[in-house]
Image: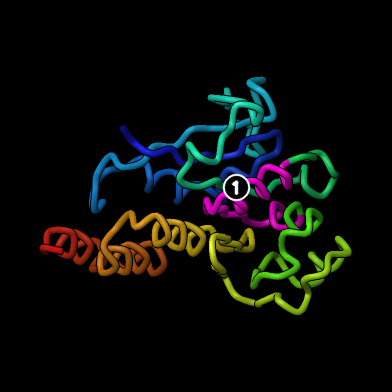
């Protein structure tokens, strides 16, 4: 039975931010254990949501049905709703996951939601900019890192400009690929150099 990676979805979700991660998790090619994970979407309830790109998503479940014990990770994308205070309660969900030792991955505006919930006060993290999080009034400014992705314990954070690095860190934490395969995957999508495509296939065929 595959373990579930939960993706939080809501109106204005930034489609591109979790795209690499979701596609990689659901595509068994090159994975260390193909089919080990599946992605299920989680909304505030089961009402359809519309992304920033105009795509309609029917959530598989609502947050009231979500149990950290039945999850391998919670991915929380950014979107305009975070800056308008329209995603109330997600901080509490993330807190429950972190308390249970289940990884949480937040990108772009979602990091401001975690900041407002006090979840970034004592851990290394990043976001769209230091000033962006300081506007929330949070207490974790001393732990801010100006980097494309930061992982501290079970928390992954990234700015909206780094969906590729965000996915790479998610894959690393989930142990989705062998390290050398992950390096080849990242190099391919980061540089666009076709030689990395062949390297990816070659690395995937090597014994672990």
**Residue 9 belongs to the span the image colors magenta:** no
Q: Is residue 45 above or below residue 174?
A: above
Q: Nearer the viewer, residue 66 or 191?
A: 66
Residue 11, x across and y down, in percent: 70, 33
Density class for disc 1 (Cα within 10 Å; few <14, some 14-19, many ≥20) is many
Residue 149 showing in the rendered view = no
Position of residue 160 in the picture relative to residue 185 (left or right)? right
Count the marks: 1
In the picture, residue 92 is in which quadrant?
A: top right
Outermost top residue: 47
Question: Image quadrant for the N terminus?
Answer: top left
Q: Secondary structure at mark 1?
A: helix
The residue under the point 81% across, 55% down is 116
Q: Is residue 165 above or below residue 31?
A: below
Residue 172, x across and y down, in percent: 39, 62
The residue under the point 62% across, 47% down is 77
Q: Which residues are magenta?
A: 90-112
Position of residue 107 in the picture relative to residue 194 (left or right)? right
Q: Which residue is mark 1?
A: 97
The residue under the point 11% across, 63% down is 207
Question: Image quadrant for the C terminus?
Answer: bottom left
Residue 169, x across and y down, in percent: 46, 62
């Amino acid at each position: 039975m595959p373990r579930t990676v939960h993706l939080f979805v809501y109106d204005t979700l930034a489609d591109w931010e979790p795209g690499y991660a979701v596609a990689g998790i659901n595509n068994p090619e090159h994975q260390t254990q193909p089919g080990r994970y599946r992605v299920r979407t989680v909304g505030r309830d089961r009402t359809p949501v519309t992304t920033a790109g105009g795509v309609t998503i029917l959530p598989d479940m609502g947050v009231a049905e979500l149990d950290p014990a039945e999850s391998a990770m919670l991915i929380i994308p950014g979107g305009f709703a975070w800056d308008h205070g329209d995603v109330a309660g997600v901080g509490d969900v993330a807190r429950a996951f972190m308390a249970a030792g289940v990884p949480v991955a937040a990108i772009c505006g979602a990091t401001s939601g975690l900041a407002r919930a006090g979840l970034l006060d004592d851990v290394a993290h990043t976001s769209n900019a230091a000033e962006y999080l300081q506007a929330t009034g949070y207490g974790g400014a001393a732990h801010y890192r100006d980097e494309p992705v930061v992982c501290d314990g079970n928390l992954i954070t990234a700015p909206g400009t780094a969906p590729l690095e965000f996915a790479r860190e998610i894959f690393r934490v989930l142990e989705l690929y062998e390290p050398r395969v992950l390096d080849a995957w990242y190099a391919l999508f980061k540089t666009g150099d076709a030689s990395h495509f062949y390297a990816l296939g070659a690395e995937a065929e090597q014994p672990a």
